[in-house]
Image (cartoon, rainbow, N blue to C red):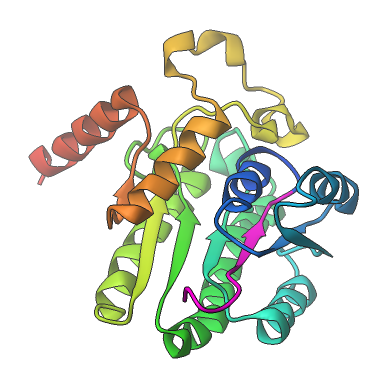
Amino acid sequence: MSDRNITALVTGASAGLGAEFCRQLADRCDVIIAVARRAKPMQALAKELQGKAEVHVVEADLISIEGVARVMEVIRQKGPLGYLINNAGFSTLGDFEGELIDSQHAMVSLHINATLSLCRAAIPFMREMGGGNIVNVSSIGAFTPYPGVAVYSATKAFLNSFSESLQAELAGSGIAVQALCPGYTRTEIHDTPTMDRFDKAVIPEKYWMEVEEVVAASLLGLENGQLIVVPGEGNLKMAKKSLQKQLDAL
């Protein structure tokens, strides 16, 4: 990989973890493909990173079949990818019975279907190149399911299991797979209309992390061959406690 340009594709790149992945990968990559529904913030990001990496802005809604197909074509044309960061996502807050089913289906489409499609599009080219890196942004919610986020937690648990199985299938290929499981992180996800009932003030300050810390932990985890990354000691303890509780219930 060292004798050619390294390209990264980051979804959900208009803000939060996605934008920060673009910033930190700009020191490692020659080309960054930023994908999100909102082009304007990505254009500002491209200007910010000018001189560090060549940034291509792709406006696409990965909930839709058309949006996924557009990004798959970008992978075909501008790949192979050295990094694929499946970060795009959202959450709702409310009991499953009371939430609109369309929003739950949309979450499954974005977190699961889009991730599967982009991985499937990228992996053959990565294999031909002799390696690559895939980060599927999951959540500590994959370990700690709570009422009110039933579908969100379930999709994140899927990403963990999928990432583990995929890494086993790709053993010896040079392709590293990671499930990144952040806890409470200061991003726009908590400020969206679907999360208007979430009160950030009830979460103690010690549980919050900044996007810079989370992305740095992810990239360090890739270097160390870490398959499941839970940034923050408090989050890691919480995840282990929840897993132990599930094992005790068997």
> Which residue corresponds to the image point at 46% horizontal and 49% vertical from the top-left?
138
> Which residue corresponds to the image point at 47% horizontal and 36% vertical from the top-left?
214
> Where is residue 122 shown, x and y percent of the image?
54, 79
> Which residue corresponds to the image point at 58% horizontal and 74% vertical from the top-left?
118
> Which residue corresponds to the image point at 14% horizontal and 37% vertical from the top-left?
244
The residue closer to the viewer here, 83 or 149, is 83
| Residue 236 lies in the magenta-colored region | no
Q: Is residue 157 visible?
A: no
> Where is residue 116 shown, x and y percent of the image?
52, 73
Q: Quadrant of residue 32?
A: bottom right
Q: In the rendered structure, which segment of residues is drawn in magenta?
A: 1-13
The reply, left or right, for residue 159 in relation to residue 72 is left
Q: Is residue 104 visible?
A: yes
> Where is residue 12 shown, x and y percent of the image?
68, 52
Number of numbered discs present? 0
The residue closer to the viewer here, 41 or 143, is 41
Query: In the figure, 116 relative to 41: above or below?
Result: below
